[in-house]
Image (cartoon, rainbow, N blue to C red):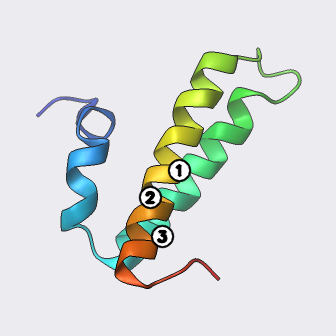
Amino acid sequence: MSRWKLYDNWYADLAGLSVEQLRERRAFAAQRAERAVARGMGRNRKAGREWRQRLRAVDDELLTRGAQEA
């Protein structure tokens, strides 16, 4: 299995995840987006943008299921 499978299949996997797994992915994506643009971490705007897109995709899936993030 690819080491990058989580990233490669991020969008395709969302529909098959449980609400709890989606919340874990949301927290992970939010953390990565924050770190990508943090001071002292070698700011990477492109990575920040990509992680925000992944975060929005998870939020959209949660909204579709009616399980909004609290």
Percent of width and height locating residue 59:
50, 63
- Picture quadrant of residue 65: bottom left
Residue 25 lies, in percent from the top left, at 45, 58
Tell me which amino acid carries mark 2.
Val
Residue 64 point in image, percent of width and height: 37, 74
Outermost residue, right direction? 39
Report whether 39 appears left or right of 2: right
The quarter of the picture where the C terminus appears is bottom right
Q: Which corner quadrant of the image does residue 47 belong to?
A: top right
How far from the left and from the top, in percent, is residue 34?
A: 73, 40
Q: Secondary structure at mark 1?
A: helix
Task: Write down the residue under mark 2.
Answer: 58
Kind of residue at badge 1? Leu
Instruction: Please name the residue shown 28% across and 58% down the image.
Output: 14
**What is the spatial separation of the Cα atoms under label 2 and label 3, in whole angstroms?**
8 Å
Mark 2 residue element: helix
Judge depth for marks 1 and 3 and give the one in front.
Answer: 1
The reply to whether the C-beta atoms of the residues labelled 1 and 2 are less than 8 Å apart is yes
Q: Is residue 30 above or below residue 65?
A: above
Q: Nearer the viewer, residue 44 or 68?
A: 68
Please name the residue that numbered disc 3 is placed on.
Answer: 23
- Residue at horizontal 69 percent and vertical 16 percent from the top: 44
Residue to which mark 1 is pinned: 55
Looking at the image, do the residues carrying marks 2 and 3 touch, with CB atoms under 8 Å apart?
no
Left or right: 16 in relation to 44? left
